[in-house]
Image (cartoon, rainbow, N blue to C red):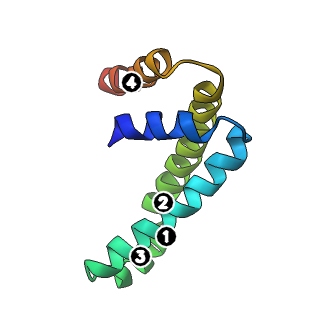
Amino acid sequence: MAALVAIFGKIGLKDIDANSATAFRSVIMALFLLIVVAVQGKFSQLGEILSHRKALTFIVLSGKAGALSWLFYFLALKYGKVSQVGPIDKLSVVIAALK
């Protein structure tokens, strides 16, 4: 699926703004994930996140980092080659492993 994100993203970004596309994609992802949580019967557990300040803080920070990551990723896809952008993006696995 990750490879399809890059391929579909590159095709979809041809004539549109990368940041606007990322925002739209994020809305689609959020709706899809809310449906998954609801189908799993775990929708009520979303409120639990709000009661755990430390968890909430790090989830918010993770969300901001993810948003910036996707903004840069889609911008790179718009102007670069998928075959170059993809491997650079996957360096995040190496950086995370160094933690």
The amino acid at mark 2 is Met
Mark earlier in primary sequence (3, 2): 2
State the CA–CA distance, disc 2 to disc 4: 20 Å
Q: Residue at x 62, y 47 (%)?
A: 22
Mark 3 crowd level (few <14, some 14–19, many ≥20, 10 Å Cα):
few
Residues under numbered marks 4 and 3 in contact, where contact means CB atoms less than 8 Å apart: no
Asked which quadrant contains residue 55, the reply is bottom left
Mark 4 vs mark 3: which is more N-terminal?
A: 3
Q: Nearer the viewer, mark 4 or mark 3?
A: 4
**Which quadrant: the C terminus?**
top left
Callout 3: helix, strand or loop? helix
| Nearest the eye: 68 or 12 | 12
Residue extending furthest toward the top: 84
Residue 78, quarter of picture: top right
In the rendered image, residue 1, in percent from the top left (x then y), is placed at 32, 43
Q: Is residue 5 left or right of residue 79?
A: left
Name the N-terminal-most of marks 2 and 4: 2
Residue with the mark numbered 2? 29
Q: Earlier in the sequence, mark 1 or mark 3?
A: 1
Distance in Å between CA atoms under marks 4 and 3: 30 Å
Residue flagged by tag 3: what amino acid is it? Leu
Q: Earlier in the sequence, mark 4 or mark 1?
A: 1
Task: List the residue tagged with mark 4.
Answer: 90
2 with respect to 30 (left or right):
left
Indicate the secondary structure of the residue bearing disc 4. Answer: loop
* Residue at numbered disc 1: 31
| Tag 3 residue | 46
> Left or right: 76 with respect to 51?
right
